[in-house]
Amino acid sequence: MIYVYVLQSEMDSGLYIGMTADLRRRFEEHQSGESQSTKGRRPWMLIYYEAYLQESDALGREVFLKSGGGRRFLDKQLRNHFARYPRRETS
């Protein structure tokens, strides 16, 4: 399985969207600071993930979630979460 996942920083409320074959290991890397792209914004909450059989399908979904339409999808899909933990607006 290939996972597309969304993390929310507890420090600045920003989102991080990624893809991995081992979600537990990757989440631990984010939490421990092993990931250069996220180590300065720890700790993280895993707020959403999807599983795919084909890496190409997961990659397409990751690209979509990083787009404006994908952000709107996440806003609707996670409206209750964001009502409690508002996300940082991106520029």
Image (cartoon, helix red, strand yellow):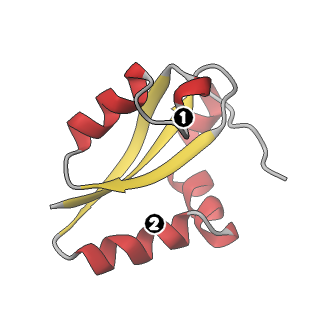
Task: Measuring from the top left, give residue 70's x and y in whole percent.
Answer: 58, 66
Query: Quick check: 78 above or below 56?
Result: above
- The answer to whether residue 78 is seen in the rendering is no
Amino acid on which disc 2 is placed: Glu
Cα separation, mark 1 vs mark 2, equals: 17 Å
Q: Name the residue under label 2.
A: 62
Image-based side of 84 in relation to 77, left or right: right
Whichever of callouts 1 and 2 sits on the residue coming sooner in the sequence is 1
Q: Which residue occupies 54% across, 34% down?
A: 38
**Helix, strand, or loop for circle 2?**
helix
Q: Residues within 10 Å of mark 1 (few under 14, many from 20)?
A: some
Q: Residues within 10 Å of mark 2 (few under 14, many from 20)?
A: many
Q: Residue 55 carries which label?
A: none
Query: Quick check: 32 above or below 71?
Result: above
Tell me which corner region of the image, top left, top right, bottom left or bottom right, holds residue 20.
bottom left
Q: Which residue occupies 30% across, 27% down?
A: 28
Task: Measuring from the top left, give residue 31's x and y in whole percent.
Answer: 40, 23
Query: Quick check: 86 above or below 71?
Result: above
Q: Which residue occupies 33% across, 70% down?
A: 58
Task: Measuring from the top left, give residue 15's x and y in whole percent.
Answer: 60, 42
Image-based side of 84 in relation to 31, left or right: right
Q: Mark 1 points at which residue?
A: 38
Amino acid on which disc 1 is placed: Thr
